[in-house]
Image (spheres, rainbow, N blue to C red):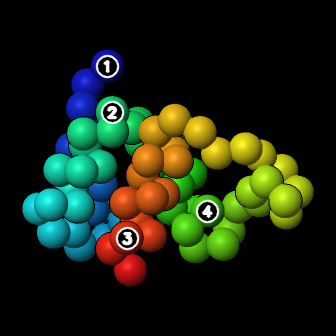
Amino acid sequence: MSQITRENLQHILGELDNNTCAAIQATGASIKDVTEAKAIADGKSDIVGQGEQAISGPVKEVLTILRQTK
């Protein structure tokens, strides 16, 4: 599995600082994981207690990072 690039991350998340980019890359998250975390952070995806899915693994890690940068 190849590491997600800064360009991929910025395409999904917008402008990122170096620390946020490195932290997300360190999770080993895929593009799909980052996209899912972004949807949850933006309130565009169901989470436990609101209907659909449990959050685990890289998605949870990326979501935590996104919430810390807001």
Image depth: mark 2 or mark 3 in front: 3
The three-letter amino acid code for the residue at tag 3 is Gln
Q: Which residue is mark 3?
A: 68
Which residue is drawn at the image coordinates 24% and 32% (left, top)?
3
For residue 41, above or below residue 56: below
Residue 28 x, y percent position in the rendering: 33, 33
Residue bearing mark 1? 1
Q: Secondary structure at mark 3?
A: helix
N-terminal of the pair, mark 1 or mark 4, is 1
What's the distance in space between the residues labelled 1 and 2, CA to CA?
9 Å
Q: Is residue 12 above or below residue 33?
A: below
Instruction: Give the percent coordinates (x, y) of residue 50.
Output: 85, 63
Q: Quadrant of residue 66?
A: bottom left
Instruction: Quickly name the residue at label 2.
Output: 28
Question: Disc 1 on helix, strand or loop?
Answer: loop
Q: Earlier in the sequence, mark 4 or mark 2?
A: 2
Q: Position of residue 20 (x, y in %)?
A: 23, 61
Task: Identify the residue position indicated by label 4 in the image.
Answer: 40
User: Circle 4 — which element?
Assistant: helix
Earlier sequence position, callout 2 versus callout 3: 2
For the residues labelled 2 and 3, say whether their Cβ atoms are less than 8 Å apart.
no
